[in-house]
C-alpha cells in the first residue's frame, strides 16, 4: 500500500477590521461638495476625514476666497465674448 498524501494546510486567515463612519451636518455637506468637485465619493472622503488625513476647517467657510477676479466680471463678459468672436 502506498501512503496517502495529506492535504496541504490552509494558510491562516488575514485579520481584518470593518468600520463605518458617519458624518453629519455642515461637515457632511462640505465632504459631499468636495467629493463632487474632486470626482470622488463622499464615503472615501469621510473615511479620510475620520482618519485625520483630510481636515475640515472649523472657521466660517464664507470667508474663503474662491474667486479673486473683479466684482464686475460678469457685467463685461458679453462684450468680451463678442469681441473675441470677430463681431
Image: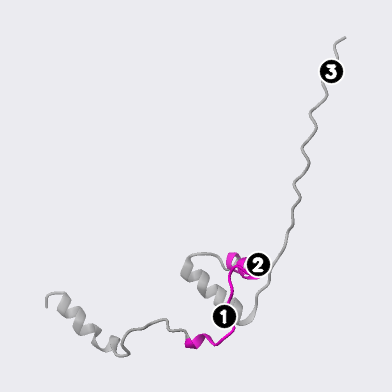
Coordinates of residue 61 in the picture (x, y in percent): 52, 85
Q: State the SS at label 1.
A: loop
Point 15% across, 79% down: residue: 83
In terms of sequence position, does the residue under pointer 3 or pointer 1 come before the other? 3
Q: What are the residue bounds of the magenta stretch?
A: 44-63
Q: State the SS at label 2.
A: loop
* Quarter-of-image position of residue 78: bottom left
Which residue was labeled with disc 2? 51
Compared across the picture, whether 41 is left or right of 78 comes to right
Residue at the far left: name it.
Answer: 87
State which quarter of the image contains the N terminus.
top right
Which residue was labeled with disc 1? 57
Point 63% across, 81% down: residue: 25
* Quarter-of-image position of residue 70: bottom left
In terms of sequence position, does the residue under pointer 2 or pointer 1 come before the other? 2
Q: Is residue 52 magenta?
A: yes
Q: How crowded is mark 1: few (under 14 residues within 10 Å), some or many (20 or more)?
A: few
Q: Does the magenta stretch include residue 47?
A: yes
State which quarter of the image contains the C terminus.
bottom left
Which disc number belongs to residue 4?
3
Report the Cα–Cα distance between label 3 and label 1. 66 Å
Amino acid at each position: 500500500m502506498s501512503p496517502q498524501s495529506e492535504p496541504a494546510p490552509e494558510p491562516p486567515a488575514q485579520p481584518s477590521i470593518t468600520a463605518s463612519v458617519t458624518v453629519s451636518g455642515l461637515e457632511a455637506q462640505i465632504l459631499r461638495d468636495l467629493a463632487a468637485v474632486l470626482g470622488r465619493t463622499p464615503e472615501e472622503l469621510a473615511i479620510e476625514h475620520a482618519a485625520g488625513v483630510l481636515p475640515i476647517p472649523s472657521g466660517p467657510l464664507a470667508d474663503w476666497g474662491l474667486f479673486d477676479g473683479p466684482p464686475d466680471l460678469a457685467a463685461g463678459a458679453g462684450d468680451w465674448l463678442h469681441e473675441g468672436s470677430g463681431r
